[in-house]
Image (spheres, rainbow, N blue to C red):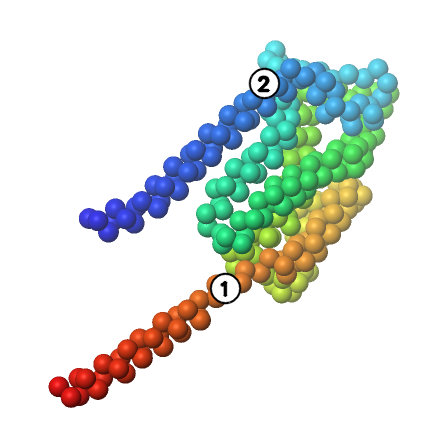
């Protein structure tokens, strides 16, 4: 019974730690959401700016159901809260996984939070300023004198936020590779040898995630991902987990045991 209890303790401890971290993250998101909701109209103007720049003059957005505008503002506020609290969320993630790391690896907390935040924000900004405008321009180009665009708030927000979140997560590739290398799943040699397959997967992902089928929009997403993949290879070379040096202490203990046994052996023979 004691053995089974000892085996269950680590799992329950991890679950309790996970619950504590999740509660803290949800509280941080709630606080950020309450702050961002006070600026919901300004945030909505920022999110819709890439579309408004390419729409014809005197164009406007519509909502087709009564609660659509309310839920649109809610989603925008939540996404803004996610960006605002991302450093704290990343810090909580690090605190959850840090007990499984070596003491020397725990000092990476600041670089992890800093670079993860920078990469995620960089991916969102890249999608906002570089990828979305040509994609929306492509769609709006089908308008004519008899065909006018009437964009729904819900449909636009779902498309824009999905793309911005996808760019933000894709730009986290070097951080993901760092931890995969630490746990021994991948290494720099493997990533280099599988480069051709990675490029193929990147272009497939770019074709799926980009809203417009033109090659320019796909290249705008594929090229940064290929650059990040090469950066990930460099990161993997520096993130190789070195084994602990326990050979010398073990050898010393064994030598002491051998000396003791040699000293006791003559006494046993005399007896």
Q: Nearer the viewer, residue 87 or 66?
A: 87
Is disc 2 placed on a helix, strand or loop?
Answer: helix
Q: Is residue 91 left or right of residue 114?
A: left
Q: Is residue 217 left or right of residue 262?
A: right
Q: Is residue 261 visible?
A: yes
* Crowding at mark 2 (Cα within 10 Å: few <14, some 14-19, many 20+): few
Q: Residue at x 68, y 60 (%)?
A: 196
Query: Between marks 2 and 1, how big is the CA–CA gap?
Result: 47 Å
Q: Position of residue 174 (x, y in %)?
A: 64, 50
Q: Residue at x 57, y 34 (%)?
A: 88
| Above-or-below relation of 140 to 189 | above
* Crowding at mark 1 (Cα within 10 Å: few <14, some 14-19, many 20+): few
| Above-or-below relation of 123 to 266 | above
| Above-or-below relation of 83 to 56 | below
Q: Residue at x 49, y 30 (%)?
A: 24
Q: Nearer the viewer, residue 181 or 169?
A: 181
Residue designated by label 1: 243
Q: Is residue 209 visible?
A: no
Q: Position of residue 136 (x, y in %)?
A: 78, 31
Furthest residue toward left: 271
Q: Is residue 171 left or right of residue 256?
A: right
Q: Residue at x 49, y 45 (%)?
A: 97
Furthest residue toward top: 66
Is disc 1 placed on a helix, strand or loop?
Answer: loop
Q: Nearer the viewer, mark 2 or mark 1?
A: 1
Q: How many marks?
A: 2
Q: Which mark is residue 34?
A: 2
């Amino acid at each position: 019974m004691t053995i089974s209890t000892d085996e269950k303790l680590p799992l329950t401890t991890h679950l309790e730690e996970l619950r504590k971290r999740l509660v803290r993250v949800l509280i941080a998101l709630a606080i950020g959401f309450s702050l961002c909701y006070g600026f919901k109209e300004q945030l909505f103007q920022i999110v819709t700016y890439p579309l408004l720049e390419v729409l014809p003059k005197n164009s406007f957005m519509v909502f087709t159901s009564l609660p659509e505008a309310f839920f649109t503002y809610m989603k925008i506020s939540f996404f803004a809260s996610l960006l605002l609290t991302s450093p704290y969320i990343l810090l909580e993630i690090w605190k959850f996984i840090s007990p499984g790391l070596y003491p020397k690896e725990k000092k990476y907390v600041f670089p992890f939070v800093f670079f993860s935040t920078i990469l995620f924000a960089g991916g969102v900004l890249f999608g906002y300023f570089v990828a979305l405008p040509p994609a929306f321009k492509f769609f709006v180009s089908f308008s004519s004198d008899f065909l006018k665009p009437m964009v729904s708030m819900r449909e636009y927000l779902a498309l824009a936020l999905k793309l911005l979140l996808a760019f933000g997560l894709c730009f986290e590739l070097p951080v993901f590779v760092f931890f995969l290398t630490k746990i021994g799943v991948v290494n720099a040699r493997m990533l280099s040898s599988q480069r051709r397959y990675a490029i193929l997967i990147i272009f497939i992902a770019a074709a799926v995630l980009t809203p417009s089928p033109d090659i320019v929009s796909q290249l705008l997403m594929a090229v940064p991902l290929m650059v990040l993949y090469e950066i990930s290879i460099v990161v993997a070379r520096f993130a190789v987990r070195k084994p602990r040096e326990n050979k010398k202490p073990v050898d010393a203990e064994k030598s002491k045991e051998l000396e003791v046994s040699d000293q006791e052996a003559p006494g046993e023979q005399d007896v």
